[in-house]
Amino acid sequence: MPQFRCQYVTVLILTAGLFYPTINVLRAAENVKLQSEILDLILKESPKPKYGVPVPEKITGRVLMKSKGVVSGIPGVSVMDGYSVVKTNKQGFYLLTPHPDAVFVNITRPSGFDVKGDWYQPLAEKINFQLKPSQDDENEYIFVHVTDTHISEDPVSLAGLSRFVQEVNKINPKPRFVLNSGDLLNLSKTLASSPESGRASFRNYVGIMNHLSMPHYNVAGDHTDSSYLIKEFPRGDHRCGKPLYWEFLGPHFFSFEYGKIHFVSVDYGYHLGQKQRKAPQYPTYMVQPMHTKWLNEDMSSRSKGTYVVTSSEYDLIKHCPDFLTMAKQHDIRLQLVGDHHIVAHKSRPVPYRIGGALSGCWWNPKANQLCPDLSPQGYVIYRVNGEKMEQFYKGLGQRIAFQSDRIGAPWKGEVILKAHLVQPQPNEKLEYSFNGMDWMAIKEIARPFIRVLFSAKIDSTQLAEGHLKISIRSTRTKEVQSRNFVVVNGGISPRAKTEAILSFKVGKRTHFMKPEILTGKVAVLFNGEIIGELTVELARKYEFRINPSQLGKANILSFHFTNETDTFCLNSPVLKIQGKEVRDPRDTAIRKVKTAHWGAKAVDWGGFIIGNAEPPDETPFYRKQNQFCFVLDQTM
């Protein structure tokens, strides 16, 4: 994600003899409030690499446990250096031949044990590790997947991370660990940030995360790499950019086990100078051979009866050679990923789930704390029960969330409104309102883990045609969440006197999709009537004339495929009438957030994925949507 903040200028307005506060003064007041929310940094001494020291030819040691004064070795524990893996013998001893580029030796936490002391150590000829029995049931537990925290020296990001830590500490039952799948910091992908900036950002991130009352595991994303020690580890060295991560967080390739899951952290960003975007040198996004070898060995060494969940910045099918082969061999069932700042799930041969973004868009308040798909900044809470996993996305600072119908969805006839309430208080309920004044109860329908689901049937034929804002609130707190929909029941036309022009463009291809090829016909429908057809030469701009008699107050653009496996992408569809441009409400909202994230040039980037075929993937720029609403006011 780009690293920029809104630039504030000093503005002094003199009206009626009164001096209004300057924007800078307001910003200063905001910073004072933010500073009060930032947790004091807790910085713990952690094992550091021994730079410049020869790598030992052999490393020996023991993984042991002390109980009532008796020391015993623990067999079958994986010990590794990020390049190869060995297992402890029956007495808990191991012998490891370290790789010449190794920095640490670490163990894989085995299910049923906690590490006493540090789980990784700098290289030495003899290294021991100590475990103790876990006191918790690992068959059923909760953990938190957070991603894209993008921490810097910006107080907005620090206050947000502080709120996250405090929220997670209050979850009941207590999560066993937090897993961050990348872009911990907001450093330059091209290593342009100074070493001092990198160190300050790491201090802020680790210092706040250390307030968690449970362990946290981290993936080094491309915004986490630093120019620190660039001379010692220059571009072309696969370790380039990693030393600050090592010094604050340890190995960037590691694994741990909890219950029946073997979690693996994979960093696929390397600064090898092989990928260029004009002048800056961007990372090479592909796991290199020495680490694919480690990954295979690590998963081969997992405890019997466990399956694998990977954590990486993004989908390893695209970024790790032979990943599908490894997935079949080692029972990889899920990938926890980030990077795209959206909430999405993909049912690939190895499914992945994108966990939104805690940052949302720290750097620009115009994003209104939203991700590019209009999800709130937030994180995912998982419950594991044996081999079953379930989850939900939680907005930062939000306990209420809509669970049905996207923003701007058309409502026709009877619709079902669903919402959930996280960690309900005694006798706490939800209620909804169309005007913010008259509130109606919502029926409780289920109690999944740590939340309650509510549902209400609504007859949309009794509502006014056009835009509809629904609010949901708690009966005990002041929290209110709202969402906009469109009522489309064939209401009275605004009696437009002139025809309208519907236009959209279908692109040849995108960075995320293969060229679109239609094997069947696609009809274009406006309010259910066919107004045209997409041609075999799909990629071009389309325009359709809409007669005044075909226009209602609320209108729907949709598509009918003769072959359900077809799909294509279009940009922002526009209905032009009487000199005005009308867009779909969700499209309008996404365009605003894209501009806040990436600047004005981004407003027309991407578009929408039409159809139900698999793939393509959803991205920050392409969202699945098969219907578009256009609401005309009475003046047209």
Image (cartoon, helix red, strand yellow):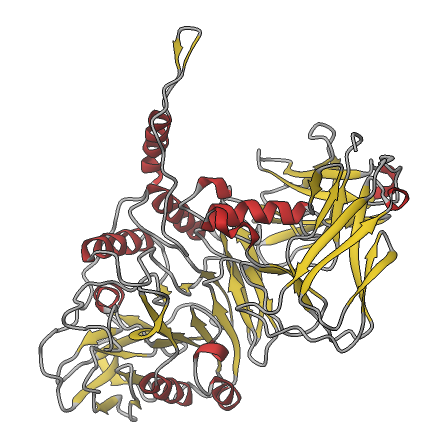
> Quick check: 540 left or right of 465?
left
Is residue 379 visible in this depiction of the protein?
Answer: yes
Front position in the image: 365 or 396: 365
Residue 106, position in %: x, y? 26, 78
- Quadrant where the N terminus is found in the figure: bottom left
Image vertical order of residue 480 relative to residue 235, above or below: above
Residue 423, position in %: x, y? 56, 49
Question: Total label count?
Answer: 0
Is residue 261 visible in this depiction of the protein?
Answer: no
Residue 376, position in %: x, y? 54, 49
Front position in the image: 318 or 252: 318
Front position in the image: 97 or 409: 409
Residue 124, position in %: x, y? 13, 81
Q: Residue at x 33, y 34 (%)?
A: 31
Image vertical order of residue 589 relative to residue 352, above or below: above
**Most distant residue in the top direction:** 17
- Quadrant where the C terminus is found in the figure: top right
Front position in the image: 266 or 63: 266
Residue 438, image quadrant: top right
> Quick check: 250 left or right of 415?
left
Residue 283, image quadrant: bottom left
